[in-house]
Amino acid sequence: MSPPIALPETFARAVAGLRSTTPRAEIVLEEVGAPKRLAPHAFALSASVLRDDDEVTTGRLILLHDPAGHEAWQGTLRLVTYVTAELEADLAADPLLPGVGWTWLTDALDAQDAGYRALGGTVTQTMSTRFGDLAGPPAVGDIEIRASWTPLTDDLAPHLLGWCALLASTAGLPPPGVTALPDRRPATTP
């Protein structure tokens, strides 16, 4: 049996930063298998965001490391994310939603001073109409945010906190320390 291969220091520090960061209570993180073919070294986390004990947003954050670097990455580390959430139909139909979703990402990273470059991605909004025996409201929408960026250092704690803030925004959670008031609108009758 051959001895284990030592991980590059940059990658090891980056993973340690991700593992040492604690998100807010509504966000549950779990280490998951990372894709093997995107880079020589990879690490991945999945996230579930709970609101009133219901899962309302999910996401994945993948750390890629190639010691040789990539021209497109403009560095040796790359963070890749996918976040999805079901939204109320009227919100999901808003033509401004993609721009707002992208701002959730950039504002979250900037608020944590998570320095980055080569940021790119997409925001997709979809509408679905349910029929027949499929339970749930007749019309629902989804938002998907897919993005990647190159961190300026291997201290990824601010990036994870920024990503968690993106998850919280996508889930419609109030800022930490703020309690959402119950919805007191009268019920409508059909």
Image (spheres, grey):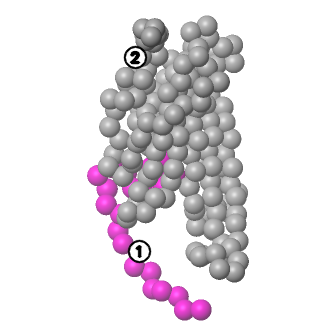
Instruction: Answer whether residue 20 is magenta in the image.
Output: no
Pointer 1 residue: 183
Image depth: mark 1 or mark 2 in front: 2
- Please say if 154 is above or below 112: above
Viewer-side residue, 41 vs 17: 41
Classify residue 61 as left or right of residue 24.
right
- Please say if 22 is above or below 124: above
On-image quarter of the N terminus: top left
- Name the residue: 66% across, 31% down: 120
- Please say if 172 is above or below 158: below
Classify residue 97 as left or right of residue 157.
right
**Which residues, given as a range, are shown in magenta?**
166-190
Pointer 2 residue: 13
The percent position of residue 46, horizontal first and vertical second, equals 48, 41
The percent position of residue 178, horizontal first and vertical second, equals 31, 56
- Name the residue: 46% across, 58% down: 55
Q: Which mark is residue 66?
A: none
Residue most extreme to the left: 177
- Please say if 96 is above or below 13: below
- Name the residue: 40% across, 42% down: 29
